[in-house]
C-alpha cells in the first residue's frame, strides 16, 4: 500500500520561519517548559517539527525518539538535536504507525500535533501501545472551543481554508475526549486561551496536561 505524501514544503518554510518564532514570542516557551518538566527515562515525541521542544527537555531524559514526517522540518530538527542537552534520535514516521515496539517508552509528548494528524484515534492508540503501563502522555494542544458561537466558527474554517493554509490543522477537535477514549486517564489538565489577543481566534483554546496509560 502506498504511503501518504507527507511533504508540505510551503507550510514547513512558513512554520520554521514565521509561525514557530511567532509562537515563541507570544509565550509558547513557558508552556513547552511546563509540558516537559519532570520527564525522565525513554521518551517519544511525535510531530517534533523543527525541534522547538528539544532545548527544554530535562537532563533526566536518557533518550528521546523524535518522530517527524515532513522532510524539511525533519532536517531542521536533526540540526537542532545536535546542540540539545539530551540524546535525541530524529526519525521519519507517522503517528498512525509509530516505528517503536510495544511498551518501550516511559513517556510520550504531543505538542500542537494532534490537530493535524490524519486519524487522531489511531495516533492515540499507537501512543498507548508504545507506552509502558502507567507511562505518561504529556500534551499541549489547541482544541474545540467552549462557546457555541466559536464552535460554529471552527466548523466553518475547518471545512474550508484552515487545513489547507495550516498544514492539515483542524481547530475544533475534541482532543480531551479522544485522549480518554484511547485508554488514558487524565491526571492533570488546564484549559486556557493562547496567545492572548484582542480578536478571538478559532485556534485560541488550548489544553495542557498529563494522562496515564492504562493496561493494554
Image: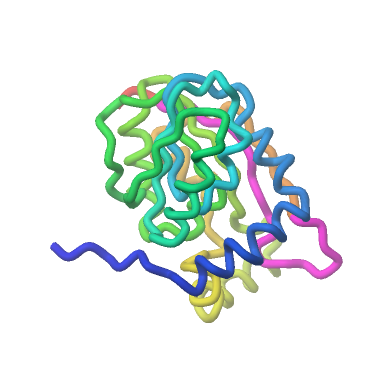
- Image location of residue 49, percent across then percent down: 50, 53
Image position of 87 with respect to 162: above or below: above
Within the image, what quadrant is residue 15 found in? bottom right
Q: Which region shows up in magenta? A: 195-213
Image position of 179 with respect to 25: above or below: above
The answer to which of 213 and 2 lies nearer the viewer is: 2
The answer to which of 55 and 207 lies nearer the viewer is: 55
Tell whether 144 sits left or right of 127. Answer: right
Tell whether 57 sits left or right of 99. Answer: right
- Image location of residue 119, percent across then percent down: 36, 56
Q: Residue furthest left?
A: 1
**How many marks overall?**
0
**Colouring scheme applied when the structure was drawn:** rainbow
Within the image, what quadrant is residue 19 found in? bottom right
Q: Residue at x 52, y 58 (%)?
A: 173
Q: Residue at x 27, y 47 (%)?
A: 97
- Image location of residue 177, percent across then percent down: 50, 45
Q: Residue furthest bottom?
A: 160
- Image location of residue 114, percent across then percent down: 48, 52
Indicate yes or no whether the magenta region holds residue 30.
Answer: no
For the C terminus, give its image quadrant: top left
Q: Residue at x 13, y 62 (%)?
A: 1
Q: Residue furthest right?
A: 198
The answer to which of 201 and 32 lies nearer the viewer is: 32
Q: Residue at x 50, y 40 (%)?
A: 81
Amino acid at each position: 500500500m502506498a504511503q501518504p505524501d507527507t511533504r508540505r514544503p510551503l507550510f514547513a518554510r512558513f512554520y520554521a520561519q514565521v509561525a514557530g518564532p511567532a509562537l515563541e514570542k507570544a509565550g509558547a516557551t513557558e508552556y513547552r517548559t511546563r509540558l516537559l518538566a519532570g520527564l525522565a527515562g525513554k521518551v517519544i515525541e511525535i510531530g517534533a517539527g523543527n525541534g522547538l521542544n528539544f532545548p527544554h527537555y530535562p537532563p533526566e531524559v536518557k533518550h528521546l525518539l523524535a518522530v517527524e514526517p515532513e522532510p524539511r522540518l525533519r532536517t531542521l530538527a536533526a540540526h537542532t538535536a545536535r546542540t540539545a542537552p539530551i540524546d535525541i534520535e530524529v526519525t521519519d514516521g507517522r503517528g498512525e504507525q509509530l516505528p517503536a515496539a510495544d511498551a518501550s517508552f516511559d513517556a510520550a509528548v504531543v505538542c500542537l500535533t494532534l490537530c493535524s494528524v490524519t486519524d487522531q484515534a489511531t495516533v492515540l492508540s499507537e501512543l498507548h501501545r508504545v507506552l509502558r503501563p502507567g507511562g505518561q502522555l504529556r500534551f499541549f494542544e489547541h482544541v474545540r472551543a467552549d462557546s457555541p458561537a466559536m464552535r460554529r466558527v471552527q466548523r466553518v474554517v475547518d471545512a474550508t481554508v484552515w487545513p489547507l493554509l495550516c498544514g492539515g490543522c483542524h481547530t475544533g477537535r475534541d482532543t480531551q475526549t479522544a485522549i480518554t477514549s484511547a485508554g488514558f486517564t487524565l491526571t492533570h489538565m488546564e484549559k486556557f486561551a493562547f496567545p492572548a489577543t484582542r480578536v478571538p481566534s478559532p485556534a485560541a483554546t488550548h489544553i495542557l496536561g498529563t494522562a496515564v496509560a492504562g493496561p493494554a
